[in-house]
Structures are given as C-alpha cells and as structure tokens.
Amino acid sequence: MSIQELNRATYATYALKTYYNYIKAWAVCIERLYGSGDDEGNTFVDKFKTTAAFSRVEGGASISEEFSNAYSRGRLTLKAIEQLPIEEYPKLALSANFWLPVQSYYAIHGVGLAAMIILGRGSPQTHRSFRADFGDLVNRFYPEPLCGRCVGGPGPKNFSFQKLSTSIDKVTRQNQLADPTFVEEIENFIGKSLSTTREKFLQVRFDEKRVERRKKRLSYKEKNECCKREHSTSICDLIYRMRVRSNYDSPDMYLFASDDAENAIKHYRDLRYLTQILITGLDILIERRIGRLKMADLTSRF
C-alpha cells in the first residue's frame, strides 16, 4: 500500500468510527432516558404524548393519495432495513452499512412527508426545506434528546443549543473517538454530532455565496447573513449528512472499513433503532390526526 493509500485508509477509518459513535451516542442517550427493556417503546410513547404541543393536535383529518404514497414509501424502506437478517448472517452488516444511511434518511423522509401533509404543514419540495421543517417538527413535538437542535454561527464558537443540556465549550472538549457507552454527560456527544454537522452545512452555504458573488472570501457580515438563512440543525440533518457522505463525498469510509462484523452489526442496530424511534414519533402524530382505526388499517399493510 502506498503512502497516499495508507493516508486514505487511515482517514476513512477515523471518519467511519466518528459516524458510528455519533449514532451510538443518540442510541445510548435514548436508552438511558427510556430504558432498554420490552417496555422501552411504551415509555417513549408515553413521554411523547405528555408534551403540550401533542395535546393541541386535533383529529378528523382525511387521508389523501399524496399522504398514502409518501407514507408507503417510508414504511417500505423501514421494512427493508428491519428485515435484513444481519443477526443470522453477521457479515451482511459490513456491506449493508454502506446503504443504511440512505435507507434511514428515506424512511424518515417518506413518513416525515406524510406527517407534514396530515398536519397541514405542506409538502417540502427539496431536501433542504424538508430538513428545516423536520427540525421544527422534532423540536416542537419530540421529547429529549430528539428535540435538540444546534443554532448560530458563523463559526463553532458562536454555536448554541436548544433543548440540550450542554454548551459549545463542553461539546468542543468532547472527543468524538471516545466510546459513547462510557461518556457520563452523553448530551455533549449529541451536541458534537449536531455542531460538526452544522459546521459542514454552513460551509456549503458560504461556498454557494462565494460563487454567487464571485468572491474568494466572505466578510463576517456576509457569513452571518448566511447563518440567519440556515435552519436549525437537528438529528435529521445528521442522518442526511451521513447519507450524502456515504454515497457521494466519502464512500472510502466503507471501502476501507476493517473486516469487523461485530462493530458493523452494532452500528446497524443503532441506526435502525434511531430510525424506528423517529418513525414511532411520526406515527403517533399521524394516528392523532386520522384516528386509531384508520391508523391500524394503514400500518397493517406493512
């Protein structure tokens, strides 16, 4: 292996471990809050239904074809994630993780669009607008930590957090290569995943503005204007970031991944679990709008 290939492999290894740890941190935090036993789903559901925003959601909504199509697409994608037999064939996870961020995002995207439609929020036409609306939705309806968001800019030192018990100083000190299982203040790790994601997306904004204005550098004022137009960063943005990076920006993460089926399985389970929890919340909102009987009929198809 050449020095260049060695550097690529080393970078890919660290990048993959970072993403694995980000998702694991969310899973660890949720399990600490809602338990890891058989009643875990019910505990999360009970917490979700006690929020003030949820109590104000009214029923009586009718199901449209647009809603049904979006919901079916999301649910079928989730079913594909759930039915892959990684426990029976562990090495499947090594290659499956390459597509898992894509499947996770589109499962959330489909059911998320359906929830927005049934809530009367419209149907976002771009991924950017969907992520913005989804961030507002989780911030309003979901319990911690899923309601957490990162805001501010233009640099990380100007970031702050909504509905997360952390600060930018604590987040900056958090090592993303540490095992989240042993991190006591786990919300620092969650903040890290959101802040680095926000930093990446803001850089895209800055690059777009530089091209638009034909400038090599933007002033602080111009960057600040970009920040005001960038939506708050949520869990959906993190999953979308993983989706883009695994398919377009850095597939080397998976191509150079070590032949470690055990860690691959753990990551598959963590991201599958996080996707299921997010969709559980969306299902609760949809059921509130259309009623239990219609919801039972809808979910029986999947």
Image (cartoon, rainbow, N blue to C red):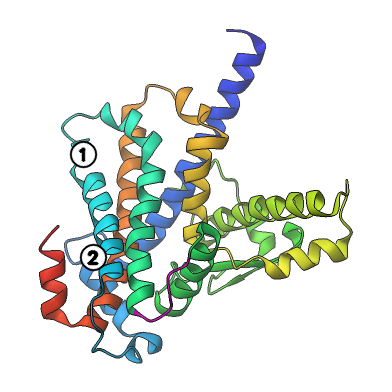
285 lies above or below 160: below
Q: Is residue 294 above or below residue 238?
A: below
- For discs 1 and 2, the disc positioned in front in the rendered view: 1
Q: Residue at x 51, y 53 (%)?
A: 238
Q: Position of residue 52 (x, y in %)?
A: 39, 89
Query: Does residue 186 appear anywhere in the picture?
Result: no
Please, what is the three-letter code of the amino acid marked with disc 1? Leu
Secondary structure mainly formed by the magenta segment: loop
Residue 123 falls inside the magenta stretch: yes
- Mark 1, residue position: 84
Residue 115, which numbered label? none
Q: Quadrant of the N terminus?
A: top right
How many residues crowd mark 1 within 10 Å: few (<14), some (14–19), many (20+)?
Answer: few
Front residue of this view, candidates 151 and 182? 151
Residue found at x 36% / y 34%: 263
Residue for badge 2:
40
Residue 39 pos. (x, y %):
18, 67
Name the side, left or right, on which 241 lies relative to 300: right
Magenta region, residue range: 119-124
